[in-house]
Image (cartoon, coloured by chain):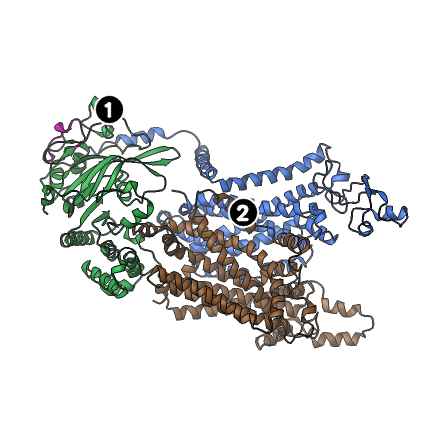
Chain colours: A green, B blue, C brown
Amino acid sequence: MTISNEVSNDAPILDVRNVVMHYRTEKGDVSAIENVSFSLKSGESFGLVGESGCGKTSMAMALLQLQAENATFKGGEIVLNGEDMLKMNPAEVRSHRWSDISMVFQGAMNAWNPVHRVGAQIKEAMDLHIRPQLSHTESRERIASLFEMVGLDPEMMDRYPHEFSGGMRQRAIIAMALSCDPQIIIADEPTTALDVIVQDQILTELKKIQHDLGMSIIYISHDIAVIAEVTDRMGVMYAGKMVETGPTIEVFHNPKHPYAFLLLSSTPSITGPRRKLAPLEGEPPNLLDPPPGCRFHPRCPFVTDQCRTEEPPLAEIGGGHRVACWNWESVPPLSEGLRK
Amino acid sequence: MDTKQVPESLQRIEVQIPDRPLWRIRAGLLWESFKSNWKLFKRNRVGLVGLVVIILFAILGLAQPILFATGVWDAKIYDVRTGNDTRVRIAEMTVVANVDEVIDPTSQIDRRRLIAEGENVQVGDVIQRELKHPWPPDRHHLLGTDPNGSDILSQLMYGARAAFGLGLLAAFVTVFIATTVGSVAAYFGGWVDSFFMRFADLLLMLPILAVLIVASSFGRFKLWHLAIFLGLLGGFGGTAIVLKSQALSVKVKPFIDAARVAGGNNWRIVTAHLIPNVMPLSFLYVMFSVTGAISSEAVLSFLGLLNIQMSWGLMINKTQSAGYLLNPATWWLIVPAGLAVTLLAGAFYLAGRGMDEIINPRLRNR
Amino acid sequence: MSGYHANAFTKGSPLGRYVIKRFVQMVVLFLVFFALSWIALQAIPGNSIEQQLRLNPNLPPEAITQALARRGLDKPPLEQFWLYTKAFFTGDLGVSWSRYPQPVSKLIAERLPRTVMLFSVALLFQYLIGFQAGKYLAWRRNKRGEIAITIAGVSLFTVFYPWFGLMMILLFAVKLGWVPTNGFIVEATWRGAPVSANHVMVIMFFSLLAVTAFIGLTSWASSRLDQPNRRRLVKIGAWVVGLGGFWLFWATNQYLVYAKDVAVHLVLPVSVLTMVGFAGVMLITRTSMLETMKEDFVTTARAKGLSEAMVRDRHAARTALLPVSTSLVLAVATVIDGGIITESIFGWPGMGQLLLASVVSEDIPVALAAFSFTGILALLGHFAADILYGVLDPRIRVTSQG
C-alpha cells in the first residue's frame, strides 16, 4: 500500500471540520460527535476505528446527511468539493448522495429491499443520477460489467436478494456503490457479518477496485486489523471524539494516545513482534453526561490531575501524526507493552 | 490474573444476595418492569387517551349503585327498567301554529289532555301542554327519559357495568384459551397443531352474527352466556392463530432448548417458559377482545336477541320498537347509547395500540 | 397472521403438491362445516314448519303429514341428512320453506348480484382511501395531526356500526333528503322496464370492473417505464381514457335511467361502509409501514438519493402492501356475514338479509345454503390469501417452488 497520496498537495475532496452532533433524547442531549475533524484526498483511503457507540457510524451517516431525526448539528462543516453539506437544502443533499458519496452498508442482509430484484435496485440509483446518458440497455450492460468487476455472475442481477449468499449480497452492495461513479465510498463495517475467508476476499476486492478506479474510501470498523490492512491514514475515535489520527503505519505501530495504545496491545498480532496483551478495563462513558476533561481519563492508566479538568487538544507530534493527550510522551512503545 | 482466586467482581455479587424472601424479589422486579413499561406507555398519547376514557366509563358504571345507596336517586324513578318518573311536567303555554303537529302521535303533546279539552283545537288557540315521555334532558334527568319514563343516564351507567363485565369476561376466556391452545400447538406441533389450527379455520369460516342468532334461539342468551360463547369462539379461533405464531417464535429461542437440555419436562417448559413469554401479546389481545365483545353484544341486543336487564344496544333497540328511531327531535334516546358503545370499544382498542407499541419493538420510536 | 401464512409455504413442498394438499384440507374442512351447520340448524328448538302448518285450522292432519313428507321431514334425522347432502352435492339446494315453492338456488341467484355490487364498490373505496391514508399517517409519525387522525380513525373503526348507519340515514336521508332512506330501487321507475334490476347491476359491475382493471393495470405498467415524465403521462392518460370510456359507455346506454336509480341508492351505504372500513385498512397500513420504515433498506434507498416520496412509495409502501392485500382477500371472504347488518339497515335485499331472514324464520334449506356459501367463500378467501402472499413476497414464492 502506498502512502504517496499523503504528500500530494491536492485540495481535499472531503473536509470535515469541527463537527459537533448531538442526539436529543428525553434524558437530555447525547453528545455523539464532539469536535471531529478529518479530511480525505482524491484516491486516498481513510479509516475510522473505535468501539461500538463511539460515534463512528454516526459520523458516516452524517457524511450522507442520513442522521437520525433527533440528531442536531451544533457546529462544524462537512465540505464536499468546496460546498458545505450542512448548509444544503434536502434536494441538493439528495443530488450528492450516491453520485458523489456512496456507501457500502454493514449487514448487507437487510440493506436490500426483499421485494425488488437486485438489478432493479441498482438501476434505480443510476436512473436518478446518470440516467440522461444511458439507455435502458446501456444501464443493464453497466450493471453487468459492475457485477463482473465484483466477481458476480451478471445473470444474478435479475434475481431477488434472498437468492444471494451473504458474501454475494455484500459484493452486490459494492457493485451498487460503484454504479454512479462516486468520488467517495463509505464502507461501514463492510465485512463484519461475513466469515473470515469471505471477509478477506471482499477487502481484497475493495482494494483492487479502489486501485483501478482511483476513488477514495472511508472505512469504518471496530476491527483495527481491518483498518490497518486497507487504509492510508486512520483516525481513532473514543466517546465521540477523535483522539488520534495520522498515517496508518505510524498510528498502528506507534500509537501515542493511551486508548489507541491499549486497543492495539489488546489485539494479538501475528506479523508484529510478540507482546503481552494488556486488557482495556472499564466501560465507555455515558455520553449523556460525559466526564470532564479528557473523556478517557476514568479508564486511563496514565491519568494525571490535568486530565480530569482540562480537555487535551488534538496536537501535531510530527509527520502528520496528531494525538489528543496531555501525557502522550509517557505512553511506551507498543513492543514494550504496559508494565503494571 | 490468578485464576485460583475468586475474582473480585464475583465476590461482590455474593455479598449482594439478600435474605429477603423470593416472592418479594419477584414482586420488586415486577414493580420495576411495570414502572418502566408505564413510562413507555405514558409517552404514547393515543394509548393514554384510551386509558382515560376507560377509567371515565368505569367511574360511570360504579357510580350508579352509589347513587342508589346514598338515596340521591330514588329507585322508583331511576331504575333502568321499572323506573318511571310520574311527576307531571307542564310545558310553557304555546300558541298552536299547526293542528297536524298537535295531532301527531310522536309530538310532545299528550293526546289524552287534548281529548279532555275537546278535540277542536284550532290554529291560534293557546294551550298548555303536559309533557309526555320521553322528556328532553333537564336538571332531574341529565340525559332525558325514555318513552317509558326511565332515566337515560341511569340506563347508560348500568350499560357501562354490563359492557365491562361482558367485555372483560369474554376477553379473559378468549385469551386464556388462545394462549394455552397457541402455546400447546406451537410446542408440540404435528397433529396437535394441525387439529387446533384446522379447528380455528373452521371457526373463522362461520358467519359469526348468524351463528350467534342461531345460538340465541336455543333459549335467550343471558349476558354471561354470551361472554363465554364469544370467549370460546375467539379463543379457539383467530386469536389462537395469532398467539400460536408468537409462541412459535418463542419456541425457537435458545432458552427453550436450554430448558429441555436441563431436563425440564414438556408441560413444565410450556407453562414456565413458553407461556410467560407469550403473555405480553396475550395481554394485548385482551384489549382487542374487549373491543370485539362489546361490539358483538351491542349488535345482538340491538337486534333484540339477548335476555338482559339493560345494555347500550338494548337502549337503541327499545327506541326502535317505540318508533322513535329516525326522529331527530328525540336525539337523546339514540345518541348517548351509540356514542358510549363507540367510545368504550374504541378506548380499549386505543389502549391496546398503546401497549402494542411497547410490546412490539418494531413499532417503537427510535 | 403473517407467520401463519408464511409457515404454510416454507415446508419446502412444490407448489403443485401444496395446492393439492390444501385443496384436500379444504374439502374435509367444508364437509365438517357443512355437517355442523346442518346439526346446529336442525337442533333449533321447535319445528317451525310443522307449527306453521298446524296454525291453519282448515288443514286436515293428512295434508300436514303429506306436506312434511314432501319436504322429507318424516324420515329419521340421519336419513334426512343423507338425502339433503346427496341433493346438495348434485346441485339441488332444495326449496325454500318460508317462500314456498321458490327454489333456493333461484333466491341466491337473485340476491347475490346485489351484494356483490354493493360490497365491491365499497371495498374498492375502502382500500384505495385506507391505503393512501395509512401511508401518509405512518410517514407523518410524531408530527402534528397524527394523534387526531389516529383517534378519528380508531373511532370509525370501532364505531357501533348499526347506530352509525342510522345516524347517517337520519342526517343525509331524513334531514337533508339528499339520498333515499332505504331500498335499492324506486319501484315506480322500474314499472314496465325492459330489463331486470339485477341485469342492470351486472352491467354496472362489469363496466366498473373493466375501468378499475384498466386504470390499475396501466398504472402498474407505467411504473416499469424509466422516465418520470413519461410515467406520469401514462398514468394521467390511463385515468382520462378509463373515466372517459366509462362516461361514454353509460351516456349512450339505453339503461342509463335505471342505472342511475341503482347508483343513487348505492351512495349512502357505500359511503357509510367506506367510512367505517377505510379506517381499518388505514391502521393496518400504518402499522405495517412503521415496521417497514425501520428496515435498513429504507436507509439504503435514502442514501441512494431517492426523494422522500420515492422512498415512501417504492420501498416502504410496496413492502407494506403485503398484509394489506391479504386483509383485502379476507374481507371479501366475510362479505356475506358483514352484509347482514349493512343490508338490514339500508334495506338492501342481498345475501346478508337472506341469511338473517332465513335464520330468524328457521327456513332451514335457505339458511343451510347461505351458511355453505359463506363457508366456501371464507375457505377460498383464506386459500387465495395464502397464494397471494406468496406471489407478492418473492422470498416465499421461490421456496414454494422448491
Mark 1: amino acid: Arg
Other residues around mark 1 within 10 Å, as few (<14) / some (14–19) / many (≥20): some
In which quadrant will I find the C terminus of chain C? Answer: bottom left
Is residue B114 rendered to the left or right of residue A289? right
Residue C15: percent from the left, percent from the top?
A: 39, 68
Asked if residue B123 shows in the view, the reply is yes
Task: Decide which of B194, C362 is in the foreground and name it.
Answer: C362
Q: Chain of mark 2?
A: C
Up the image or down, B122 lies above or below B41; here it is: below
Residue C303: percent from the left, percent from the top?
A: 30, 50
Q: CA distance from mark 1 to mark 2?
A: 55 Å
In which quadrant will I find the N terminus of chain C? Answer: bottom left
Q: Chain of mark 1?
A: A
Other residues around mark 2 within 10 Å, as few (<14) / some (14–19) / many (≥20): few
Residue C28: percent from the left, percent from the top?
A: 51, 68
Mark 2: amino acid: Ala
Up the image or down, B20 lies above or below B163; here it is: above
Task: Decide which of C241, C121 is in the foreground and name it.
Answer: C241
Is residue A275 rendered to the left or right of residue C66? left
The range drawn in magenta is A323-334
Q: Which residue is mark 1?
A: A308
Asked if residue A278 shows in the view, the reply is no
Number of marks present in the image shown? 2
Residue located at (21% from left, 25% from top): A307
